[in-house]
Image (cartoon, coloured by chain):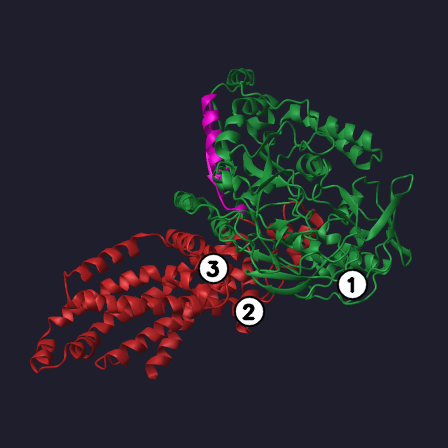
């Protein structure tokens, strides 16, 4: 999933000096309000209709109003949602979901297996124009139905009110995780074209009000099957300017803040601010994709040389306030398949020069490095430019807006693209498959245009492997293989840094974007300290 | 009245020009609306289907005819991203931008003009010097910086006002001051120089000679004659308000049209961009017309024919 930080962020540096005067007011008495207020939305959600929830702000809210068959806990473990449990057939192609009974939608209609079939069919139907559909496309007949060439989705069957049997085109071990994606959340039959403006689900929060570009307000669902949320209501504010979000937090008007990239140091190095922080490793890889189909980047020695030439440790320390861990592969350390014994490419300019000489390019290489427009990406690009200059590679930095960057990356018209990748679901497959699988070159997310049949074979085998241990081994092997091939400059796995007001009780920072549903969070009105 | 009709007739080619240019510019700009719709991970079947649905495979002239036809029927289309009708989005956002701009303008007039009058009445006095200093600062500081400093001072440190968001008058003060700050300064300078000029005119000396009170001379004789350049500045400033609102609305999370346009551009939401630009150019034309009418009202010697 893509992240779209605000393009004005870099200006905020100008006021950091002033911000120092206004020390944080942590420890102040709790506000009288009974509404939880989240400040993380930087732009208006695209849609509150699960079938169109294609960005992080939309997905976050959809996961509060609706339920999927499964869901993620804050620490990103897969949990039962509307399905109490599920079985897999021996061939791995058929999933039987046993649904929770006595669940009702927020409009009082009882939830049944028909709603699961109805929701998926609706999302896939051509007239719904659902996006993104890929979490549902593994279901048999889904592709044909979405293309308008089949009358029904053959893989969806509801044998009784509390059972759904889903047949897949081919075995897919991660399928239960895809069922937690926003597009797979369950809607009532009444969902029409303008469902986004008045969504109704089974989730812990019911929709109250949406003022576009301002806020979305939700109210506690008193009949939620998991027990009603502790707080009365929840407001998700949309604040495009990170400095304004910080100000709102410091004035006590919001309960939660995502600490902006550029303010990391000011928060981690001030004691009273530091006390409010929750730091969680996020499933977010920062990397520079090498377009291996372009010129000298086709040579593995050149790609490895670049990895040796860049001092990532210094970039992480100096530019990012040490907010992350160096990447040795594409699988985040917390996911099964990550190899904790593998070491990142060391900073070794001599080795880099040697490899470049062997490749026949001692001094003549020039590349365009495209960077995402928002800090700290351009700063990192400049650092990379400096390091590569030291080993004789000339870099031209191309700084464009996200839309241009994405278009160039997909069309393969950029040499190197500096960007990040944020997991949709917590599984190594979500990195190995979209980012580097041959068939995903370009459109599917593989902007390295990396094509390696041995790698593809390993990833394909992992996708259908049902045994967790076996699958983890395959993931690790695939990661190892591509790491030696170096289709990218591996940078780091980023940490999410949240500031939480002292009066907020029960908030656990989520690893995956849909992982925090605010059900156990409340404002502690007892006088603080 | 005849003049009004002529001006309106002249506005038509202007608007048509805007329509063509804004349409073509977006096709020259890099980036792909379909890619922005589907996100980073997509299958090519979906992309192809959307492209066909959005008529993006048609030749550009045909696409333009398609779009212009819609506009003539009063249909600005639906947002590629949210699927909502553009006209509704504009109707939702523009009043908020207008409120902000009018408030800023009101502040500029009620603060800037009196400041300029006082400064002109006592040239080189301490008020004049202070006003000059304030005016220079007001013109020099970027809107962005002014906005953030105001937030830090009034919302974080003093906690008198909310830092951002949309709501009652309390939410309006900081963004209006921020948006108006430049204009207050410009208007004070403009009023001062225009007043200085009229204050040395013969009719002012005559007015004083016949024993009129100071305020009567200032308001009825001097200011009335100094109004034209002030109106010009105000009229020109409307453009600045609309562009300034982009930054101001972003800083203060103000849900107006400026922010809407910026978001639309970032996501290559063609119908939203085109619709907003078209609408804003209509506003410009209307404001220019109003300025001309205001000239005639302020100065009866001006007759349009």
For residue A462, which quarter of the picture?
top right
Nearer-N-terminus badge (2/3): 2
Segment tinted magenta in the rendering: A374-402
Label ID, residue B162: 3
Count of picture labels: 3
For residue B108, which quarter of the picture?
bottom left
In the rendered image of the structure, the colour used to display chain B is red
Task: Say above or below: A455 vs A195.
Answer: above
How many residues crowd mark 2 within 10 Å: few (<14), some (14–19), many (20+)?
Answer: some
Q: Which residue is mark 2?
A: B87
Task: Say above or below: B31 vs B208.
Answer: above
Task: Say above or below: A411 vs A485.
Answer: below
For residue B297, which quarter of the picture?
bottom left
Asked if the magenta segment contains residue A419, the reply would be no
Asked if the magenta segment contains residue A391, the reply would be yes
SS at badge 2: helix
Percent x, y of residue B33:
58, 53
Task: Say above or below: B253 vs A296.
Answer: below
User: Is label 1 or label 2 in front?
Assistant: 1
Give the left or right position of residue B184, taking residue B212 as reference. Answer: right
Query: Residue A482 or B134: which is nearer the viewer?
Result: B134
Label ID, residue A413: none
Percent x, y of residue B123:
14, 63
Q: Which residue is mark 1?
A: A105
Report the residue at 26% width, 78% height from top: B298
In the rendered image of the structure, the colour used to display chain A is green
SS at badge 3: loop
């Amino acid at each position: 999933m893509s992240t779209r930080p605000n393009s004005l962020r870099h200006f905020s540096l100008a006021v950091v000096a002033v911000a120092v005067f206004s020390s944080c007011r942590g420890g102040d008495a709790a506000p009288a309000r009974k509404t939880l207020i989240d400040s993380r939305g930087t732009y208006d959600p695209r849609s509150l209709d699960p079938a169109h929830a294609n960005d992080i702000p939309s997905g976050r809210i959809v996961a509060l109003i609706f339920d999927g068959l499964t869901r993620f806990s804050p620490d990103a473990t897969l949990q039962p949602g509307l399905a109490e449990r599920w079985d897999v057939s021996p061939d791995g192609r058929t999933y039987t979901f046993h649904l929770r009974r006595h669940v009702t939608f927020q409009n009082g209609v009882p939830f049944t297996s028909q709603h699961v079939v109805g929701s998926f069919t609706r999302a896939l139907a051509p007239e719904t124009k659902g996006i993104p559909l890929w979490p549902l496309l593994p279901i048999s007949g889904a592709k044909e139905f979405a293309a308008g060439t089949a009358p029904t989705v053959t893989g969806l069957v509801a044998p009784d009110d509390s059972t759904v049997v889903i047949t897949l085109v081919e075995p897919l071990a991660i399928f239960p995780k895809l069922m937690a994606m926003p597009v797979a959340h369950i809607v009532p039959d009444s969902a029409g074209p303008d469902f986004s403006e008045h969504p109704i689900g089974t989730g812990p929060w019911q929709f109250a009000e949406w003022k576009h570009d301002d806020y979305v307000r939700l109210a506690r669902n008193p009949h939620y099957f998991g027990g009603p949320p502790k707080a009365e209501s929840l407001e998700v504010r949309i604040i495009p300017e990170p400095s304004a979000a910080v100000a709102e937090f410091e004035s006590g008007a919001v309960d939660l803040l995502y600490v902006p990239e550029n303010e990391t140091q000011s928060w981690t190095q001030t004691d009273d601010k530091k006390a409010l922080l929750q730091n969680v490793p996020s499933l977010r890889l920062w990397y520079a994709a090498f377009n291996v189909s372009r010129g000298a980047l086709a040579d593995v020695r050149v790609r490895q040389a670049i990895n040796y030439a860049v001092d990532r440790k210094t970039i992480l320390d100096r530019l990012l306030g040490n907010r992350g861990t160096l990447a040795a592969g594409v699988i985040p350390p917390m996911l099964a398949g990550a190899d904790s014994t593998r070491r990142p490419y060391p900073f070794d300019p001599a080795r880099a020069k040697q490899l470049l000489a062997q490749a026949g390019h001692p001094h003549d290489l020039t590349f365009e490095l495209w960077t995402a427009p928002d800090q700290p990406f351009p700063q990192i690009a400049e650092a990379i430019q400096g390091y590569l200059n030291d080993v004789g590679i000339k870099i031209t930095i191309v700084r464009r807006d996200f839309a241009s960057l994405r278009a160039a990356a997909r069309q393969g018209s950029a040499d190197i693209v500096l960007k990040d990748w944020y997991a949709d679901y917590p599984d190594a497959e979500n990195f190995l498959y979209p980012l580097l699988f041959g068939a995903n070159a370009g459109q599917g997310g593989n902007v390295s245009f990396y094509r390696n049949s041995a790698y593809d074979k390993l990833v394909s085998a992992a996708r259908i492997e049902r045994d967790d241990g076996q699958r983890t081994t395959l993931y690790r092997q695939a990661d190892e293989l591509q790491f030696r091939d170096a289709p990218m400059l591996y940078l780091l796995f980023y940490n999410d840094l949240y500031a939480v007001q002292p009066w907020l009780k029960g908030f656990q920072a989520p690893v995956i974007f849909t992982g925090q549903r605010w059900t156990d969070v409340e404002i502690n009105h007892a006088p603080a300290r | 009245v005849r003049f009004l009709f002529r001006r309106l007739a002249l506005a038509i080619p202007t608007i048509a020009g805007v329509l063509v240019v804004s349409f073509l510019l977006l096709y020259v700009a890099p980036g792909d609306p379909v890619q922005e719709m589907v996100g980073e991970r997509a299958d090519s079947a979906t992309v192809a289907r959307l492209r066909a649905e959005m008529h993006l495979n048609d030749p550009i002239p045909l696409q333009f005819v398609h779009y212009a036809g819609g506009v003539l029927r009063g249909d600005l289309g639906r947002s590629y991203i949210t699927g909502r009708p553009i006209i509704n989005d504009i109707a939702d956002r523009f009043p908020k931008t207008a409120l902000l701009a009018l408030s800023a303008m009101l502040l500029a007039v009620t603060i800037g003009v009196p400041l300029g009058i006082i400064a002109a009445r006592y040239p080189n006095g301490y008020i004049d010097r202070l006003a000059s200093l304030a005016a220079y600062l007001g013109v020099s500081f970027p809107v962005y910086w002014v906005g953030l400093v105001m937030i830090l001072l009034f919302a974080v440190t003093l906690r008198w006002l909310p830092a951002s968001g949309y709501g009652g008058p309390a939410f309006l003060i900081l963004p209006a001051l921020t948006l108006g700050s430049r204009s207050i300064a410009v208007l004070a300078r403009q009023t001062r120089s225009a007043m200085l000029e009229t204050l040395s005119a013969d009719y002012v000396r005559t007015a004083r000679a016949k024993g009129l009170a100071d305020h009567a001379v200032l308001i009825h004789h001097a200011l009335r004659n100094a109004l034209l350049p002030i109106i010009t500045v105000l009229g020109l400033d409307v453009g600045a308000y609309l562009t300034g609102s982009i930054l101001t609305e972003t800083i203060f999370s103000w849900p107006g049209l400026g922010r809407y346009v910026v978001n639309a551009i970032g996501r290559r939401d063609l119908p939203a961009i085109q619709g907003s630009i078209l609408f804003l150019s209509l506003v410009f034309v209307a404001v220019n017309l109003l300025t001309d009418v205001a000239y005639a009202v302020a100065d009866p010697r001006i007759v349009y024919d």
